[in-house]
């Protein structure tokens, strides 16, 4: 009985790890796609790559860009901010 419970526990943990990892990778790819499509309309991506902002800084910057005309949807905004924070924070 203990062996069966151990095997089931390992399988469940494996699925959780794999599923969670794939979700993170998908979110990262989506964030990158949004950045490439939305941010490069008005300026080069070098400007983004060279910026180092914390989460609060990226939230302010993305909101500022939206006010200036960046076409980032309400669904894209948190994904973009998460991506920028993860990849381009000090």
Image: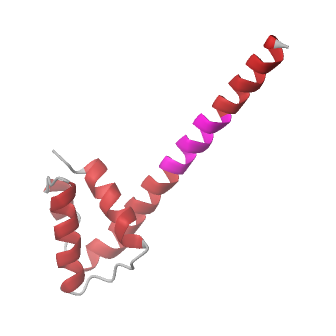
Write down the quadrant of residue 36 in the picture.
bottom left
Q: Residue furthest right?
A: 1
Q: Is residue 22 above or below residue 75?
A: above
Picture quadrant of residue 19: top right
- Viewport quadrant of the C terminus: top left
Q: Is residue 63 left or right of residue 28?
A: left
Q: Position of residue 76 (x, y in %)?
A: 40, 71
Residue at point 18% right, 59% down? 56
- Name the colour scheme: secondary structure
Can you tell which quarter of the image residue 61 is in? bottom left
Is 75 a magenta residue?
no
Residue displayed at 62% across by 38% down? 16
**Percent position of residue 71, x then y:** 33, 83
The answer to whether 87 appears left or right of 5 in the picture is left
User: 89 or 74, which is in the foreground?
Assistant: 74
Q: Which residues are magenta?
A: 15-24
- What is the x, y in percent for residue 64? 17, 77
User: What secondary structure is the magenta-colored segment mainly?
Assistant: helix
């Amino acid at each position: 009985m203990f062996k069966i419970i151990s095997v089931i526990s390992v399988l469940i943990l494996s699925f959780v790890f794999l599923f969670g990892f794939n979700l993170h990778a998908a979110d990262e790819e989506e964030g990158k796609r949004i950045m490439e499509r939305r941010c490069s309309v008005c300026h080069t991506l070098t400007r983004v790559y060279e910026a180092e902002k914390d989460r609060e800084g990226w939230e302010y910057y993305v909101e500022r860009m939206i006010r200036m005309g960046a076409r980032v949807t309400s669904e894209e905004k948190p994904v973009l901010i998460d991506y920028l924070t993860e990849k381009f924070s000090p």
